[in-house]
Image (spheres, rainbow, N blue to C red):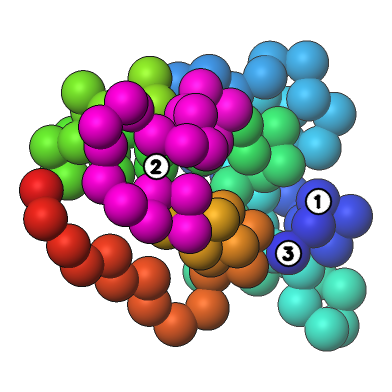
């Protein structure tokens, strides 16, 4: 739901809410608007001013739960398409498959081979 559809500000000031936001006035959340045009006071949704903070929180949580934080310095930009010298055959093919999956994540990506 966009802030254009959101109505009244709600709640107390969460971390990283923008106190200058004209939609939530710093609350970080809004009451969504019903079809009648009235605010739905039974629910709250994050304001768009919190989008970046919510994405950072989600990323941090996923890294913590997956125990893969030590791999965060790897990216498609930092990997060499040919892999390391003496590396695994087919690395370039696996890398391209991973790039395609990252661009359009549908189904599963399963990589199988020697470690």
Mark found first going from the N terminus, 2 or 1: 1
Whether residue 106 sits left or right of residue 62 in the image: it is: right
Whether residue 75 sits left or right of residue 10 in the image: it is: left
Secondary structure found at label 2: helix
**Label 1 environment density (alpha carbons within 10 Å; few <14, some 14–19, many ≥20):** some
Asked whether 52 or 82 is in front, the reply is 82
Secondary structure found at label 3: loop
- Which residue is drawn at the image coordinates 38% and 19% (left, top)? 73
Q: Which mark is residue 1?
A: 3
- Which residue is drawn at the image coordinates 49% and 29% (left, top)? 80
Q: Which mark is residue 58?
A: 2
Label 2 and label 3: CA atoms lie apart by 19 Å
**Label 2 environment density (alpha carbons within 10 Å; few <14, some 14–19, many ≥20):** few
Q: Position of residue 77 (x, y in %)?
A: 58, 28
Q: Position of residue 7 (x, y in %)?
A: 78, 55
Image quadrant where one finds the N terminus:
bottom right
Secondary structure found at label 1: loop
Q: Is residue 27 visible?
A: no
Which stretch is magenta?
76-93
């Amino acid at each position: 739901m966009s802030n254009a559809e959101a109505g009244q500000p709600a709640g107390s000031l969460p971390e990283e809410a923008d106190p200058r936001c004209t939609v939530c006035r710093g609350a970080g959340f809004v009451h969504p608007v019903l079809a009648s045009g009235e605010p739905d006071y039974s629910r709250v949704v994050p304001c768009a001013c919190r989008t970046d903070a919510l994405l950072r929180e989600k990323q941090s949580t996923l890294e913590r739960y997956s125990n893969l934080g030590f791999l965060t310095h790897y990216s498609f930009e930092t990997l060499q398409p040919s892999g390391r010298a003496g590396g695994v055959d087919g690395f370039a093919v696996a890398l391209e498959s991973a790039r395609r999956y990252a661009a359009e994540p549908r189904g599963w990506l399963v990589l199988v081979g020697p470690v």
